[in-house]
Image (cartoon, helix red, strand yellow):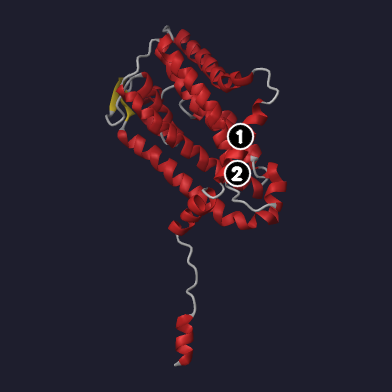
Amino acid sequence: MSDLVLTRDLPAPRRHSLWSDLREIAVDELWKYRELLYELTLRDVRIRYKQAVMGFAWAILMPALIVAAGTLVRFAMAYMGGGHVARDVIAGMAVKALPWAFFVGAIGFATSSLTGNLPLVSKIYFPREVLPLSATFAQSFDSTIGAITVGIALPLLGIHYGLAVLWAPLLAALIFCVTAGAALFLGCANLFFRDVKYIVQVMLTFGIFFTPVFFEPRMFGPLGARLMMLNPLAPLLEGLRLSVVEGHNLLQPLVIMGKKGAVVAWSPWYLAYGAAWAVLGLVVSMLVFHRTEGKFAEYV
């Protein structure tokens, strides 16, 4: 009888549920070390602009180059087809170039954030998530400057803002979640497999041709448009263009008649698909990062 009582008095083994792990990451650790996250983000921003000749102009250089390259591509296509490049096409590319530049810049820095801070990772305890997240937040600083510039430039291209522009903050938040999730996952993977950064460089270089930045998915026909929208970034970028440039309410479908039949240019399900990738991708990446964090010291 006494043995039974003693057994009952023993503490129950700790169970790591999905909710407990998320609470430990987001509340117990990241919130506790929020000042460290802020300082690392500030450090990355200062390093980026320290002794930089162009200063804040670097924040708009990458999107401007993307728009210039896209304009040349669309101009060549229009010339061969006997058409012209309208100003709203250039405006659409500008709106989509900004989040693409944010994604490329954040992933580029975040992938090497752990291997580039090995003394911190190996000698000091802190939630390692702050390293790829600080790279993502630092890139957000550049994108904020670029967003202000694009917001001022669009009216010069004849774009008039409507109520649909209110979708932009939600889409920007979802793009940040997608980027943060990819940053956590790739930063962790690069610590275990050091050639991940080279694969990422290749994917980022050619990824713009598989993401609707230079063009719209409807240009590929009914089937091609659906396939293009499978890219998690595609619905978010196209949603930005439609809401900001064309003033389309994203809760309403948009069907365009093309030479090969009707093309679904937009569906509210595209928004749900992109949001699911953003939220679930971030949650899964945080869990994978957190549960492999204990093995980081073995690979440093």
Q: Is residue 143 left or right of residue 217?
A: right
Tell me which corner region of the image, top left, top right, bottom left or bottom right, holds residue 49: top right
Look at the numbered disc 2 and give the secondary structure of its residue: helix
The residue most toward the left is: 252
Q: Tag 1's secondary structure?
A: helix
Q: Give amino acid for label 1.
A: Leu
Residue beneath the point at 35% across and 35% down: 270
Look at mark 1 in the image and give the residue it sits on: 42
- Residue 161, given in percent of the width and then of the height, sits at 35, 18
Q: Earlier in the sequence, mark 2 or mark 1?
A: 2
User: What residue is shown at x 59% (from left), y 51% (from top)?
Assistant: 127
Crowding around mark 1 (Cα neighbors within 10 Å: few <14, some 14 to 19, many 20+) is some
Q: Residues within 10 Å of mark 2 (few under 14, many from 20)?
A: some
Q: Is residue 79 above or below residue 201?
A: above
Label at residue 127? none
List x then y, in percent, for residue 158.
38, 10
The image's mark for residue 36 is 2
> Is 106 drawn above or below residue 260 in the view shown?
below
Q: Which of 61/232 is in front?
A: 61
Q: Is residue 235 visible?
A: no
Tell me: 118 left or right of 126.
right
Question: Can the viewer see residue 202 in this picture?
Answer: yes
Real-space CA distance between mark 2 and mark 1, rounded to the nearest whole angstrom: 10 Å
Residue 13 % position (x, y): 50, 72
Of 2 and 274, which appears nearest the observer? 2
Amino acid type, mark 2? Leu
Total marks shown come to 2
